[in-house]
Amino acid sequence: METITHLMEGFAVAGTPTNLAIAAIGAFLGTVIGLLPGLGPINGVAILLPIAYAMKLPPESALILLAAVYAGCEVGGRISAILINVPGDAGAVMTTMDGYPMARKGLAGPALSLSAFASFSGSMVAVVGIVLFAPLLAEWALAFGPAEYFALMVLALSCLGGLVGDSLVKAMVCVLLGLMLSTVGIDSNSGVYRYTFDLLHLADGIPFIVVVIGLFAVSELMLMLENAHSGAAPVSLSGRLMFNAQEFALAKWTMLRCSVTGFFVGVLPGAGASIASAMCYASERRMAGKDHCFGEGDPRGVAAPEAANNASAYGSLIPMLTLGVPGSGTTAVMIGALTLYNITPGPTLFQDQPVVVWGLIASLAIASVMLLAMNIPLIRVFVKFLAIPNWLLVPGVAAISLVGVYAVHGTTFDLILGTLLGGIGYLLRVMNFPMAPFILGFVLGDMMEQNLRRALSISNGELDILFSSPVSIGLWIGALAMLVGPRVAAALRGRHAGEPQPV
Amino acid sequence: MSERVFGVLLLLLSAAGLVIGWDLRAPVSYEPVGPRAFPLLVFVLIGACALALVFSRRAPTRWAPPAVLGRVGGLFVVVLLYALLFDKLGFIVSTTLMCLPLARLFGASWKQALAAGACMGVALFILFDRVLDVALPAGQWLKPMLG
């Protein structure tokens, strides 16, 4: 019952006119950012965070904006997937498989509205999941000491390392580079200047926003120039816009199943929207039996990935809100947003900042309804955004990104540092180094070090304390399994290389 | 090959980090773990990963063709110059100047690029500085003229 009271308080926060307007603006901007190929949720959140901060929005409003953008991106990605066969973000890759064929058959309208509804169902299932599970997890995690925390963060980093990118070493390198950048600045325990090279600007550490904009905005622009796609003309949106009862009946259980699966996949650190949507698409295809036309425009093939990617995007907020340990790049940026406002992420968040947490949860529900309302009648408006040429988009993103960085400290130094990091980010990304572990390492670096030092202070320097409780041993085993598991699986698969691979 | 080169660079980074980090000692300490332990651990691990990159066989990196790389380099230089001149020239002028080459890189005509630059400079300035209350630099060159 306590939960219901809190949820009502949350709706009171999210329902103020300002926050409703912020959620609507966020949902709209998110959809647009999501549908633009090249820009995804992490870029959207990265670009808007500094602006929200500079506008001096209160923390709950800033978080509502970021969450609405995140939700909007997951919905918007499908538009370009269906109409031009180019996924707008990573979660929409599987939507192209059946969405584009449907559009080619003249069913672009139903494909878009059915996928909007699938996204809505994924979102709603996930909001219910968050309300049910998040407080429980947070309460359980309250018993964590510094040793358990340290192990938990190692687990989060190794989950991302094991699942993202093409090689473990590359993900490790990125995690370590992130940790390395987090050590720059005055050490808060001893007052020693670390790696500041006598630069005054580095004394307080490298600002989070500088790293985020460099890695996710500047480097993205460079990649967009490299991958400049030829601007395929979108399939025209003619005929009926709404899906019919037959299509809905075919896809309804798919939506429900994928919403639930997507939510649980999202909760696991490291496994994000793209893994959830690929998993759900594959399993629905297997379950469909013989009379399906997956790959040629089956409505279920559109509903499955869209329900899954929204549910998993929302689910990934759980580790962030309850443990303070983000499981994905986008939630890592959101954790960074909390620290900008001097809010310490962690299990105490539910007790110390109920306004922020429950306002965020309630606004997710509100934003989902708004997204459904926007995405069915206003779909033609969004389709127009597909026509924005890159020559207008790229300078715009460059200018807005630098405005955000400049707004934080007002120094040219931050702008130059961000641009240089962007150049490094580009080189790393071309060599297939994943960026999400980098930002996760940077965000968790300080907390990891503090918890390690606190744990070792308690034990007077004995390393045993890190492995002393059942919880921390379990977390260490989990971390090891995440690092070694995918390699063993790959080796086993290699032995059966002759067999056809499941899609 | 590129990954090996990068591995060597990382190895140098790790060595430099270890050398600098070795001297990070707190003058007075009440804790078993001082300020240098964590960075040293990170740099040791970076060194290990660097060795793994240098000595493992991997698929070669696919770089864009030289012409495209040149354009990407051009974009980087433009953004870097934009960062340098952001508060000296002021937001409107620097943004217009940045838009011009960037829009050209992405295939706009001179006319489109100039229009996009001028409009964006003014429109974003009004949006952020006036409407959203995010202070932007007006430019040092304006000061003498305004007295």
Image: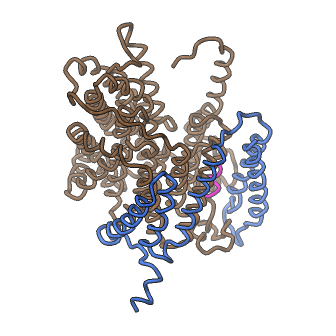
Chain colours: A brown, B blue
Within the image, what quadrant is residue B114 found in? Answer: bottom left
Within the image, what quadrant is residue A51 found in? Answer: bottom left
**Does A427 appear above or below A117?**
below
Q: Is residue A404 left or right of residue A249?
A: right
**Does A135 appear above or below A66?**
above
Q: Is residue A98 left or right of residue A444?
A: left
Residue A177 on the magenta segment:
yes
Where residue B29 sits in the image (x, y, percent)? 69, 67
* Number of marks in the rendered image: 0
Quadrant occupied by the N terminus of chain A:
top left
Within the image, what quadrant is residue A301 found in? Answer: top left
Q: Is residue A241 left or right of residue B81?
A: left
Residue A479 on the magenta segment:
no
Res A428 seen here:
yes
Could you say which is closer to the camera, residue A419 or residue A363? Answer: A419
> Which contiguous range is marked in magenta?
A176-181
Where residue B80 sits in the image (x, y, percent)? 57, 64
**Does A70 appear above or below A400?**
above
Where residue A265 sits in the image (x, y, percent)? 44, 31
The main secondary structure of the magenta stretch is helix
Residue beneath the point at 44% across and 62% down: A399
Where residue B30 sits in the image (x, y, percent)? 67, 66
Q: Is residue B134 left or right of residue A188?
A: left
Identity of the residue furthest to the bottom in this view = B147
Could you say which is closer to the camera, residue A16 or residue A432? Answer: A432
Identity of the residue furthest to the top in this view = A290
Res A344 seen here:
no
Could you say which is closer to the camera, residue A97 or residue B23? Answer: A97
Could you say which is closer to the camera, residue A459 or residue A415? Answer: A415
Residue beneath the point at 53% across and 63% down: A207
